[in-house]
Image (cartoon, helix red, strand yellow):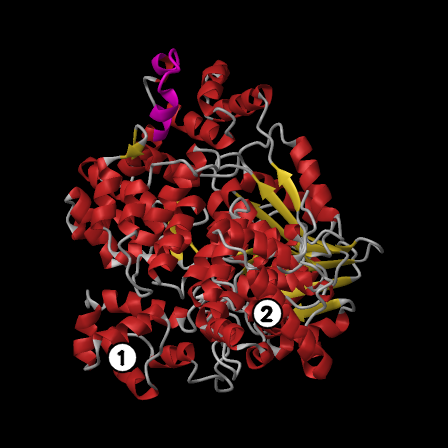
Amino acid sequence: MPHQCDGDAFFRHQLTKRRGVDVDLQVVGVRRHAEVIREESKAVRQLEPKRASAVRHGGLVTNLDRMLAHLRMRLFAPPLVKAGTDAHRAVLTRVYGDSTGQPYSAMSAIMTPSKSHRSPPYLRLGRAIADARVEAGFQRQGDLATALEVSQQSVSRWEAGTHKPRRDQIDALAATIRLSAGDLRRMAGYDATMAAGIVRNLPLDALGSEAFEQFTALLLDRSLAGGWTVHRLGKTGHEQAGGDIVATQRETGRRIGIQCKRTAQFGPRLVESAIKAFPEPMEQKVLALSRVASPQAREVLKDHPGWEIWDQDDLSRRFRTLPDHVQDQIVETYFPGQSLDLLGRSRVGPWQDLETFFRPFSQPGALFTHEWELSGRDLDLDRLMTAVSDTVNRLTVLSAPGGMGKSRLLLEAMRRWRETDPVTGLWFLSTLADLERGDLAALGPGPKIIVVDDAHDRDTLGALFEFASHRPNQTRLVLATRPYARSRLVREASIYGLEPTIVELATLKRKDLLELGRAMLAEQSKPEDWAEQVATIAGQSPLIMAMAVRILSRDEMAPERLRGEEGLRNHVLQRFAQVVTGRLGPPEEASANRHLLDVLALVQPFHPEDRQLLELVQAVHGVPAAETERALIRLIDGGVVLRRGAQHRLMPDVLGDYLVDEACISGDRLSLFAESVLAAAPAPLLRNIVLNLGRLDWRRRDGDTANSALLNAVWRRFASIENAYDDRLDAVRAVSVYQPRQALDLVSDFLRRNIAVDVVPEILRNIAYTGDYLGDAIALLWELALK
């Protein structure tokens, strides 16, 4: 259990242990001057929190930022600089900056969110320019800069999203890279509003009959207040007794019946026919038309009380009464790419409903799918449902290694949740869009659940945690993560006062894994008695089980392979990679696909348009950039590489884990392949490479990398960093969470040499998140403050 301790004693102990000196004199001196000032100045009394609220050691473990705020307010306030002795004034001025109150940059970096973790202000504009540049034939930024008569640095800043072109540069840029000047102006913020009349009716007539029914059912479901159940009466071709959609109010039994008509002409005679074909009594009956109804058609309804027409105008108007994030979801589902025309905004928000979020993984014939039976998870499902149902609990964290079925369990839990509580909003944070604060406000009032799958891939969720911490927002969060990121996420959430309920996914019992295997084999028309051998190679992973069944069902030698267990698991994963690469093009291109997969697994997440990525594959494997580019397109089109946020990753995650493990480890050291990638990688790609290797080491050693020598060569290279502008510092920051002891040694060396001090607080922050090295991190922060 964390123990209570006096703040002065704790810091004095840590600093004395670290530096071998007693700083009691300094602490007492600072306190004496603080007491004098407190008696003389009311303003200072307001600034100085009472020393009686001693720093709680355990609180520091989970809330380093608040500890630093306490330090800065208690010890480094400008009045202390003015009132102290010359010796104390010299120390405090070095720490605080000067008597004007301007903070020392290192302390400022601690007290404010790191710029490196903020999204650039023009990220979408930068991505659009980068994509269009390559498509327009400008392979390098310098080529575009020459064409526009600007500096290459300007183009680089535009594409990074940190700067935007001047207003007078937009037209030339648009013409050169073949983009709409209006779109560029809007993304740059030059045209904040759109002219009236640009936003038009929904193009419902462009939908097929089936899609029009689905759209109308979704619109009705989203526009009705809670307490209604909406369902379709079969689909096109079924006997529907004249109706297509029925909405039932659960409490009263009141019903709304809708008949959908997608025709070019729908005059009075057809209206009469539709009414006669809908004999079932309902309180409200609606004709939904994909086109604008004629006055004559509406006139017919005067003789038929209880009937209404919702035509294209009416449906579009109902659509625009929905919250922005619901409009975004509907447009992306039924009218993709038309956000600007239909919504008047070029950006689509990050919120998706359950079906939209899981649609890429819901195709039965796909290489990777969640549509397998959930077996042996009843207890885990109950625990997750109980945690989510607790309205006092605002954060639930589902934790398990890759391939254990986190996403599949989420899918089942949220399906059931929606059936039991259709009133509470349920939204998934999309992997295709970055979260902005305005997106949270767009969710509107009322209770809501926000689900973040693969939260370990998110750099920060601070905005989401802050939003959920305010009870009036009525928000509960559900995060699914791998164990290596759980501690970081929990500590970040604690800064905002969120105490999570942890649901650790238990390993499947063998009988449950066998039951799952038999069901999968039966689906593939294979002998169910294979399940014993397949379960052996799957370990406790249902995902490996699914992959094994899929591979063995296509392998003519499967019966012989099942006779021996040794190496069969690797064979399945290797064959999965081979099936992936071999089925996505001619056989002669399979080698290029596999070489690319090895590199992608190590550098992910990545931007497909990054020329440095193609050049890295060429440097390591000798595959020409043009051939690698074609292979990358094949992997994306084949569903093996999926967009996750602003970048792309391999799917499933366990495939990437296997490829990194197989290609990068040779005994207890890095393989020649890994060494060659590290040697050839440009600085922008180095961060992810080192981070993925650090995660690999963390997994192999169950979270204890203190004595690991796997990345010693990498850390030796980092020792040559000489200033705060070295691009390799991004890699140090990222991997310090998984290699805290090594990062601590490097930071100690930085302070000894007095270099890169501006970035030291961010590295120490990541080290402190691990908990084991909190005291050392605090001591180094203090040492930095005294410099």
Kindly state the secondary structure of the residue where label 1 is placed.
helix
On the rendered structure, is 142 left or right of 552?
A: left
Q: Quadrant of residue 177?
A: bottom left
Q: Which residue carries the number 1 mark?
A: 173
Q: Are marks 1 and 2 in contact (CB under 8 Å)?
A: no
- Please determine whether, in this image, residue 452 is positioned above or below residue 323: above
Question: Image point 47% across, 53% down: which residue?
Answer: 19
Mark 1, other Cα within 10 Å: few <14 / some 14–19 / many ≥20: many
Above or below for 624 versus 590: below
Report x, y in % for residue 228.
Answer: 75, 56
Image quadrant where residue 373 sits: top right
Badge 2 is on which residue? 75
Residue 682 vs 620, above or below: the answer is below
User: Which of 359 and 432 lies nearest the eye of the viewer?
Assistant: 432
Q: Decide which of 72, 550 is in the foreground and name it.
A: 72
Q: Position of residue 497 (x, y in %)?
A: 67, 58
User: Is 563 contained in the magenta span?
Assistant: yes
Vertical side of 668 occupied by 54: above or below: below
**Residue 274 seen in this snapshot:** no
Residues drawn in magenta: 560-573
Residue 16 place in picture, x, y as percent: 53, 52
In space, the residues marked 1 and 2 are separated at their CA atoms by 52 Å
